[in-house]
Amino acid sequence: MSSAIAVQASEPDNYYGYRSFKKGKFEFSRDEYFVKVKWPKGSHLMPADVFLRALQRDVAWNFFYGTVNFDHVFGTLNHYGTVDMFAGRFNDAYRNAGLDYVETFSSDDLMATFKAVLDDWTNKGYDPFAAPEETANPYGRKNGSNVDAISRQRVTAQRMVGCAGDTPVRTDANGYPVNRHFADVPQDQPEIHAEQGFEDEVRAFNLFGYLSRSDVTWNPSVCSVVRESLYCPTSEEFILPVEHGNDRVEWFLQMSDEITWVVKDKETGAPRANVTMRAGDIAAMPADIRHQGYSAKRSMLLVWENNSGKIPELIASGKAPVTPVKF
Amino acid sequence: MSSAIAVQASEPDNYYGYRSFKKGKFEFSRDEYFVKVKWPKGSHLMPADVFLRALQRDVAWNFFYGTVNFDHVFGTLNHYGTVDMFAGRFNDAYRNAGLDYVETFSSDDLMATFKAVLDDWTNKGYDPFAAPEETANPYGRKNGSNVDAISRQRVTAQRMVGCAGDTPVRTDANGYPVNRHFADVPQDQPEIHAEQGFEDEVRAFNLFGYLSRSDVTWNPSVCSVVRESLYCPTSEEFILPVEHGNDRVEWFLQMSDEITWVVKDKETGAPRANVTMRAGDIAAMPADIRHQGYSAKRSMLLVWENNSGKIPELIASGKAPVTPVKF
Amino acid sequence: MPDVKTVFGSLADYQKGGIQVINDDPRNYVFSNVFEVASKARPYERIAVGKNFEYVIECLRAEGTSPWFTCDHDEFALVMDGTVEVRLQKPGAGQAAPAGSDGAIQMKDAPGGPRMGRMVCRRGHMALLPKGAAYQFHADAPGVITIQTVHGPLTIERWAEICETRSI
Amino acid sequence: MPDVKTVFGSLADYQKGGIQVINDDPRNYVFSNVFEVASKARPYERIAVGKNFEYVIECLRAEGTSPWFTCDHDEFALVMDGTVEVRLQKPGAGQAAPAGSDGAIQMKDAPGGPRMGRMVCRRGHMALLPKGAAYQFHADAPGVITIQTVHGPLTIERWAEICETRSI
Ligand SMILES: [Fe+3]
Ligand SMILES: [Fe+3]
């Protein structure tokens, strides 16, 4: 990221201690409980934890695929190089009232502001990646910071976790203890018997054990790669902090426990379905919806993405269907 | 309440420790994070704190005026003697899909179940009446109880707080210290000079001081009465735990600080307006909306209700307008 | 908590909020501000700022000494700004408000009955104006009172002048 | 935390979820369950349970010894139930999948190249099936494997038989 990118931040507020930020015609401020987003035609309040948990994912995912709705009003839409920041764009009532607003930024430019906001508004002890039972209360006035938590690097395997030179498996020793909700998950590794000279190709690892040691929630990370086909497993607890409106079909394979997906129309936000997935269930999320998951117990989810850069245009132009299979 | 009223409760769950409950064809269960409500045509998940904070108000208010929406799906509608419990009734998408469901109970009958649920699902240290900064995390498995917190009596003055034989003023000595957010509120009482024989009629008290000592949030309580005209001031912090769809017009006089009201259509839930009220602002909430308030700093709000039992029918039949004044 | 600042309003310093319309008419909210209303009012005009069937909340600019009022039901005066002395006295013969009547009436003469007492109320103080009593306000400096009462002959309605009609 | 219970599925014990439609068609979700699919499959059929353009997730019932497969790109096998031995060997002359081809092919004969090794994988273990290698599965008892791969000549699509079409 260029050091020339300017972040417009105020001095810390005398009362609450937080800085306010401007980006384009958007303004962001926070107090003890809420984040306020202002744009030329309106303003909107969100609980600070809802905003920070969503912001943390948007930052870690580099704006991810498609639409990252922080809630029913505010979010970002990724164009891979540029990104739209919007208010009311995917909300029927705001659109009909003409209160929706969109501004486009270079991804690096908006990212600089988002990182600054995340850093200033995250207090000591609060980890926006963690499940609510695992972290401190996000509210109150400015109180320290948590740089380590918010600057975790997202795992991206090039071939497969555990391959030579690739992302390593997780162990107590490298800082990944087993999560309390996965204390019963077997930690044995596969028996591997490689003939001499084939050690780099005879590779396997315990994926469930690996996920049981994740220190974050709702953070799909690439673990195996077939061309543009990315397996992005993740451990999930409580509520997905965003309503994700993908610009392509994505697939979920529920590997353990249970998640309920609340599915709404991508454009309007109107409810479409509630999809309950239990261990072994596999389902597609169509390209014209937004989805938000609820996981009461920490669970293991395989998110499967097709990373091809051609797809958003194919979907948007109607050349590819919004569902992956007709039957 | 009759001791003959039966509450259908399961034994405590082996894993989470909470009981499940049935009332009519509704079923209620909770786990570490969520409450699940099931009815014959669907089911719905809510974060446990959202459910408990709403349930606490519904219990304390004896189902209040009109509709108490726990969220966009579940809630109660008061008929004063009987009460509807509903799912999807005030949600356009659920209604259009025919997934809405309503069952009517005698108020005492449903109240017995609601109180049992509230008691079983509220853990030690968690106070559903308190602001999030003032109470423990509501999540996790069953862990003790908090009977004192959930069985507070709602204050109901007969004439005015501080009148002879009426609700007393609050002091440190009677268990109401000044709230941290109101540390700067003057605690002086009016100077009262009553002639002999008129001591019971020459009465005044410090209402702002009284509110600064409230130990609960979002709990309007009668402080002065003119026939059916009830002043119900309350101290507000964070988010009103329900979307209140009144069956009559109610009025708000903002006495300190600031609240933003998110206003939606009562029937459909479609957004209508955001109303920001600052100290001295007074406004009506029409009878055809639902409203939910956001208060970043603890604030003082005067809720003004007309308690006349004739009004719901006048409004419902169209004989009275849904707004109080035409101009 | 190192410091807190509770924001009350006053004639000298108030900041109005407003209505951001999505799909609505701002008039539905009958939105005004008691300090703004009082700042434009003559002393002791009883201007309705809230109305719910027969019940009203009246807003009064307290400045100098008011006429004597009396009312056949309880009313409650809440001081929103300033310091207001509330003087209570029993009406004399023929001075009482008609039995069962709504709202306050203004008395032509000073009340003829015995003094009941007086109260000095500052911001946030609420005083009972008991049924059947005569009462008078006095404020050395301008202040604001709201009264919980019933619509009566003195109640002034000027909604179009005081209420918000535009979306912010 | 006194005890935890992570719920995995198996051929012997799985509980399907489902789709509660509000305004939708359940077919849009192409919803199936790998244990149910495998319970109705013949050993080592490669049944697509996920498809995204050319990419697929195949579900295999592991039971006994599989044919030898080979593929010109990496694939990844995830054991969802049971214990599966994965045997790797280099193909002999003429046995490799065509360069640049998609998906796995079945080999007529045992691979003629040198042994690469073998891996014993239990539930939750993921094995690399490296580009250009021949591979064979063996399971003493029935198990379930899912493979991350590309749609190829062995991929079976039977969506109408495996997918949910009704709202719960
Ligand atoms: Fe997604
Ligand atoms: Fe209300």
Image (cartoon, coloured by chain):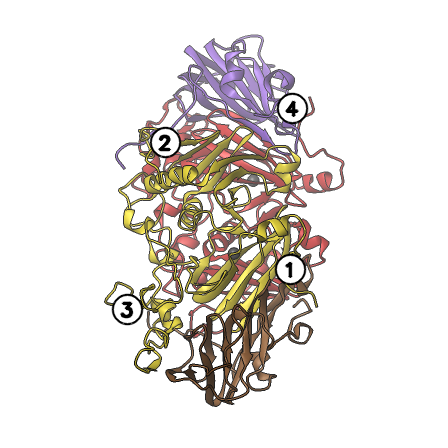
Chain colours: A yellow, B red, C purple, D brown
Disc 3 and disc 4: Cα gap in Å?
82 Å
Q: Is B185 located above or below residue A119 in the figure?
A: above
Dividing the image into four equal quarters, which quarter contains ligand 2?
top right
Given the image, on which type of amino acid does mark 2 rest? Answer: Ala
- Against A71, residue D153 (above or below) is below
**Disc 1 designates what residue?**
A323
Q: Gap in Å between the C-alphas at discs 3 and 2?
A: 40 Å
Whether marks 3 and 1 lie on the same chain: yes
- Counting residues from the start of the chain, the first of labels 1 and 2 encountered is 2
Asked if the residues shown at circle 3 and circle 4 are in contact, with their CB atoms under 8 angstroms apart, the answer is no
Same chain for the residues at labels 3 and 4, yes or no?
no
Vertical arrangement, residue D116 with respect to residue B118, above or below? below
Q: Chain of mark 1?
A: A
**Numbered tag placed on residue A313 in the rendering:** none
Please state the chain letter of the residue tagged with numbered disc 3 in the rendered image. A
Both labels 3 and 2 in a single chain? yes
- Residue A171: give its label: 3
Q: Secondary structure at mark 1?
A: loop
Q: Badge 1 local density, few (<14 within 10 Å), some, or many (20+)?
A: many
Task: Name above or below for residue A60 compared with residue B274.
Answer: below
Label 3: few (<14), some or many (≥20) within 10 Å?
some
- Which residue is located at x 34 percent, y 69 percent? A162
Q: Which residue is mark 2?
A: A6
The residue that disc 4 covers is C101
Q: Disc 1 marks which amino acid?
A: Thr
